[in-house]
Image (cartoon, grey):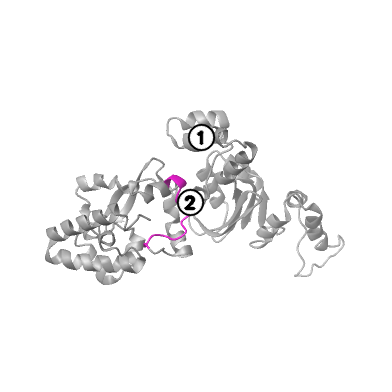
Amino acid sequence: MKHPELITQVFTEHKLPEKLSIRPPFVKPRVDKKKEALLRNIRLDVYEFFVGHVVPERQNVSVIKANTRDDIDEQVNENTRSIINLKPINNVRYINKFLMRVNEKMPDAGLFIGCVEPVKNVERKLREKIKMPFLFSFVWFFVFVFHRVMPKIRYIQKLYFFFTQGKYRFLTMGETLGRIVSCGFEIIEYKEIDGLLYFSVMKTSEPVYGQKPSFGPLFPMNRVGRNGEMIKVYKLRTMHPFAEFLQDYITKLNGYNETGKPANDFRVATWGKFYRKYWLDELPQLLNVLRGELNIVGVRPLSRTRFNELPEDIRIQRIRFKPGCIPPYVALLMPDSEGNIEAERIYLAEKMKHPLWTDVKYLFLALFNIFSGKIKSS
């Protein structure tokens, strides 16, 4: 429901007399007609979200309705400091190139406010229309494959974009925010309003050019290996594309859970939770074992960010050995964050004295704990 009369009141209260020759410094400047028309047609709660970050009426704030890079070039004013795009980015053909153009048009610390319709809300609306569960599942499967899977497959995506012209893209919150961060922005706030996810982000750097995010089922992760060298560890994908760009944001926002992984991680997909529950996502790490980068048993392969957060003594001992597929906490039943570190400390101390026997002992203990249900994957 829109509230044009309330938005009109906002403008009316701040209108200046036409003959006023000296403008008081505390009075807002007059708004150009095109911007005023755009702002009159938005919901009050959306307008309040905008006002929480910028003053839309100011001359250095461009309010646009853009789906292409040409739209940005045409609608963004000179000397613009902040941009508000009223159109969801679901209808943008080249999303990252679009975001990069926004980045180019703004100075450092400039704000960009936009919106997206998350795929979960599309699913909910379709479920409300199709009441029969079986029929909904049948229809949703094909709709999801067409709008979510086809754009990610290299040779099929051209066919998809030919039919859709890049409109009606299915995007998750995780992928959207990951794309935004990869294009040189830092997330300030996001909020769902009337089925759309509105976000406010700040330009903090240039875009990450030449990025090659993984879209396939096999996901390579940069991890700290033996002697501190970075290796690529393979897992089955459990997160949405571009999730890797949100690692620092998620950990700063929510910290870590009791198992040492990012807490309340919205990047994990529905199928990803299933894979993690039954340890299926770990199976591709056997490729790393065959390549000599991992052992079957060993300390967890960690990202550089997480590795640097460990106590110094653990960091020094860790890089003396290869990481492993099965971490010590599984064998010692110490899955919480602090227990994780202590389990590694115990394992490394034993490993220094009896390398082979320690791995054999921890392997059988871990398998017993897994199959007896004493420990579960997070």
Image position of 108 with respect to 129: above or below? below
Secondary structure under the numbered disc 1 in the rendered image: helix
Residue 69: in sight, yes or no? no
Image position of 217 with respect to 301: above or below? above
Magenta run includes residue 266: yes
Position in image of residue 50 (x %, y %): 66, 58
Q: Which residue is mark 2?
A: 178
Position in image of residue 60 (x %, y %): 66, 58
Position in image of residue 31 (x %, y %): 76, 56
Image position of 271 with respect to 12: above or below? above
Secondary structure under the numbered disc 2 in the rendered image: helix
| Foreground pick, 285 / 67 | 285
Position in image of residue 327 (x %, y %): 27, 58
Q: Which residue is mark 1?
A: 141
| Foreground pick, 369 / 344 | 369
Q: What are the residue bounds of the magenta stretch?
A: 259-272
Query: CA gap, disc 2 to disc 1?
Result: 25 Å
Residue occupying image coordinates x 38% and y 47%: 275
Look at label 1 and name its amino acid: Phe
Residue 171: in sight, yes or no? yes
Checking the image for residue 183, the label placed there is none
Q: How dense is the environment of label 1, judged by Cα within 10 Å: few (below 14), some, or many (20 and up)?
A: few
- Whichever of callouts 2 and 1 sits on the residue coming sooner in the sequence is 1
- In front: label 2 or label 1: 1
Residue occupying image coordinates x 78% and y 58%: 30
Q: How many marks?
A: 2
| Foreground pick, 352 / 232 | 352
